[in-house]
Image (cartoon, helix red, strand yellow):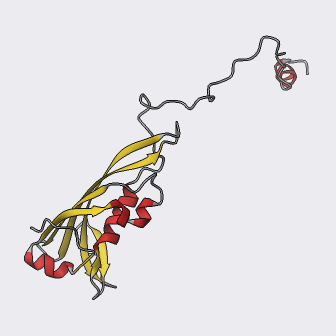
Amino acid sequence: MLNDPIPSHVDPRKLADRGTTLEGEVQLADLERLCDPLADNVGVVQAKFVFERDERRSVVIHSSIDVEVKMVCQRCLELVTLPIHSECSYAVVKEGANTQSLPKGYDVLELGEDPLDLQSLMEDELLLALPIVPAHHPEECQQPAGLDEPEPAEDEVTRSNPFSVLAQLKRDPNV
């Protein structure tokens, strides 16, 4: 097991033959696409990748990625810290290969002769794990000032519904 910084590019076939596990950290600021929707880019991504061959001798990658990110709560517009966790299992196949025979539960990862961009894969997984609408838990969320419903003033005239006449006509059997 390697417990160093996660390399940016790897050859998953060679690592699977050795049964290698890569475990380490990546600075959040290094994942630029992931930092776009975030409030800041301070933090560390904890990642673990297990490379192995399954019973069909297919190359398989199991990933587990954790990070805490800060986003803007869409209810109160304050910062909210959200733990993001992603687990995924990939079956590595050659580009254009038939994927019908792969066991269920694997995401297909088509790879040519080039090395696998592991940081890009990490970034994709985390982007998919981000919440669509970031928010605090409802009991923790504070409503922004000034958004309370205004109470009607005493001197305000109540208006009648213009459709109330139509409702009366509809009820009247003589019309």
Q: Give the residue at x 47% y 60%.
A: 36
Residue 107 is situated, as x and y percent measured from the top left of the image, at: 29, 68
Query: Does 89 appear above or below 174?
Result: below
Query: Does 164 appear above or below 120?
Result: above
Q: Quadrant of residue 145?
A: top right
Residue 155: tell me if it is visible.
Answer: yes
Choose between 56 and 13: the one closer to the eye: 13
Residue 57: tell me if it is visible.
Answer: no
Q: Give the residue at x 82% y 16%.
A: 158
As drawn, the residue found furthest toward the top would be 154
Would you say 55 lies left or right of 130 here? left
Q: Give the residue at x 31% y 62%.
A: 27
Q: Quadrant of residue 144?
A: top right
Residue 94 is situated, as x and y percent measured from the top left of the image, at: 28, 84
Query: Does 58 appear above or below 34?
Result: below
Q: Assign the C terminus to one quadrant of the image.
A: top right
Q: Give the residue at x 8% y 77%.
A: 18
Would you say 130 lies left or right of 113 here? right
As drawn, the residue found furthest toward the bottom would be 113
Q: Assign the N terminus to one quadrant of the image.
A: bottom left
Residue 157 is situated, as x and y percent measured from the top left of the image, at: 84, 15
Query: Does 106 appear above or below 136?
Result: below
Q: Quadrant of residue 91?
A: bottom left
